Amino acid sequence: MAIDRITTVKLKEMKAAGAKIVGATAWDFVSAGNAESAGVDIVLVGDSLAMTMRGDPDTLAITLEDMIYHSKMVSRACKVSMVIGDMPFMSYQISPEQALTSAGRFLKEGGVRGVKIEGGRKLAASISKTTDAGIPVMGHIGLTPQSIHQIGGFKVQARTLDPAIDLIEDARCLQEAGAFAIVLECVPAPLSAHITSLLEIPTIGIGAGNACDGQIQVTADVIGLTGANPPKHAKRYADLNSAWTDALREYVKEVREGAFPTDDQSFSAGPDLQKAIDDKEL
Ligand code: KIV
């Protein structure tokens, strides 16, 4: 039977039908498999994995090679969800040609079915070049973590009129350039509601209120994997970090006490070997 994959066309139809789109990040085969089993539409191999999985202070150091490595594992797990590769810092900012080359590598080597690019209208030419080559591009405006040193911290963007007008113009330009969806990160809820109503393509919010066409979250925040306090825009649905550590603590205790392994986790010897051992022949 043909697989009913999530595509850019389907995502647009979901917006038109008022059906909420759900995105979550993944970094390997297990996290991607769980996202797909849970019914996530867009599985993003987000560069936030640099912080959540590698312990980096920000997303700047991760390379295209690193991202392709993670994308391969994620793509192998997802048959239905649309896997998007997050273009890392300095893999697209130099020129539209560089953006297309990096996006092409993401698809050919990482197996993703689209890429995400941070930035507003200045990236329009790169988005056009990439989409003209048949590669779906998701925009990302508002808080763009790759510009953290320019923005001056992980904080809400466009809270006042002039930056809000700028952001609306960015959103329009990205749609015009061919983006199939736009992530709005840490944007006041009324502004993202307004942008959502202006665009034909879906808006996917993270810290952007409930009126967006969909939501995306960093999975480590949602499942409580890192132990760090989640940001204000995240909701923790589980505390896997505690469950994981508690399980390992119990294992450590049982090994030290000699309570693990028991016969249940051990293998018996063949009859001749057992006899030789019992008869002290060895
Ligand atoms: O890298 C990431 O996880 C992201 C999401 C926050 C959208 O870009």
Image (cartoon, helix red, strand yellow):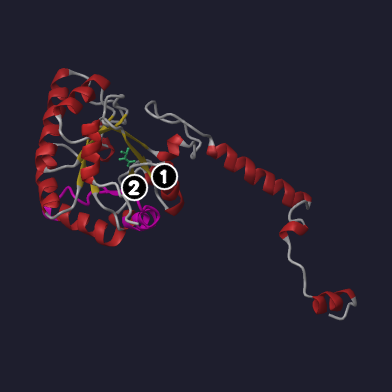
Where on the picture, by quarter, is residue 47? top left
The amino acid sitting under disc 1 is Ala
Name the residue located 48 percent from the left edge and 32 percent from the top edge: 237
Which numbered disc covers residue 198? Answer: none
Can you say which quadrant of the picture contains the C terminus?
A: bottom right
Instruction: Report which residue position mark 1 lands on.
Output: 35
Q: Are marks 2 and 1 in contact (CB under 8 Å)?
A: yes
Q: Which mark is first along the chain, 1 or 2?
A: 1
The image shows residue 202, relative to residue 8, as above or below, that is above
The image shows residue 41, relative to residue 232, as above or below, that is below
The image shows residue 64, relative to residue 141, as above or below, that is below
Q: Is residue 160 left or right of residue 254?
A: left
Residue 9 spot, x, y in % from top left:
20, 44
Secondary structure beneath disc 1? helix
Secondary structure beneath disc 2? loop
Instruction: Report which residue position mark 2 lands on.
Output: 81
Quadrant of the rendered image holding ligand 1: top left
Q: Is residue 237 left or right of residue 202?
A: right
